[in-house]
Amino acid sequence: MSEIDYGNKLSWAVGKKRVLCMGVSNIDCVSVVNNFPEENVHEKAISGSWHRGGSASNNCTVLRNLGVNVEFFGMLSSQPIFQLLIEDMTNRGIIVENCPMCDLDPPFANGIMAKSMNTRTLIICNRGFPYVSIEDFRKLNLNNYGWIHMRALFFDTNIEVLKDIAAFNATKEEADDKILVSVEFDHSLEILFPMLDYCDYAFFSKQLAMETGWTSMENACSQLDERL
């Protein structure tokens, strides 16, 4: 048997090239309450916590738990509070060495989880914290990566990144040398639709389905197929 058993509970990606998750990492402050707070009423929390959040950051954690060699690529902050997030990622074995850094306050989110209603409300604060640029991306050695995943957040940057990956793949003859690309869409599909031309895999959120008028998974696939 080979050193890596791909039929075991470890991910198929173990031992392959690095997976890059491009996006953001922020601080999540979560309060769990019985009932969603009413106006001018003090609601006592059942519990509360704060932890590292952000779609790309969370994806990295899941992939590391599956044994995947994974890298987070997003803007970091030099502010002291953000060092806890960086330490958490490095302690888990998530690569962050290629991330650019700024001295601005990092973004954060307040989450309210109401048990009686089984709802989750997020209040996000991002005071102009920068997203990675295409120049930052072009400093990466794409030969290191077998898969790149991103959330569609900023069309101008995201589409340039996708074009660069496509150009890189065009220089490779072997399929194993090409980079697989996946993109997560959760808003503004009309604006972001051209990005689908560059995806091997696309993920669509429930929020986007409601925004777009998709009534089921089958309906979503039918409408996408018709438009593509």
Image (tube, rainbow, N blue to C red):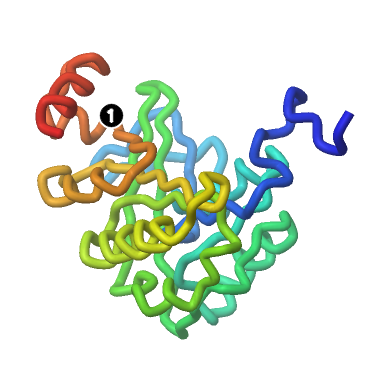
Is 127 located above or below residue 11 in the figure? Answer: below
Residue placed furthest toward the front:
173
Q: Eyeballing the image, is 21 above or below 101?
A: above
User: Badge 1: few (under 14), some or many (20 or more) residues near its Cα, within 10 Å?
Assistant: some
Question: Which image quarter holds the C terminus?
Answer: top left
3 lies above or below 217? below
Q: Is residue 58 visible?
A: no
Residue at point 60%, 41% (across, down): 62
Residue at the spot 74% in from the left edge and 60% down from the top edge: 91
Q: Position of residue 127 (x, y in %)?
A: 30, 72
Return the residue found at the far bottom.
103
Image x and y of residue 125, in percent: 33, 62
Residue 24 x %, y % = 43, 60
Is residue 119 positioned above or below 91 on the image? above
**Circle 1 SS class:** helix
Number of numbered callouts drawn: 1
Q: Residue at x 53, y 73 (%)?
A: 99
Q: Quadrant of residue 153?
A: bottom left
Q: Image check: 117 left or right of 39?
A: right
Q: Quadrant of the N terminus?
A: top right
Amino acid carrying label 1: it is: Lys
Q: x, y percentage for residue 13? A: 65, 40
**Closer-to-camera residue (185/118):** 185
Task: Say which quarter of the image contains residue 217.
Answer: top left
Q: In this figure, which residue is indicated by the disc labeled 1?
A: 206
Please give left or right for residue 62 compared with residue 125 in the image: right
Most foreground residue, 107 or 222: 222
Q: Quadrant of residue 215?
A: top left
At x 62%, y 54%, the residue is 18
18 left or right of 203 in image: right
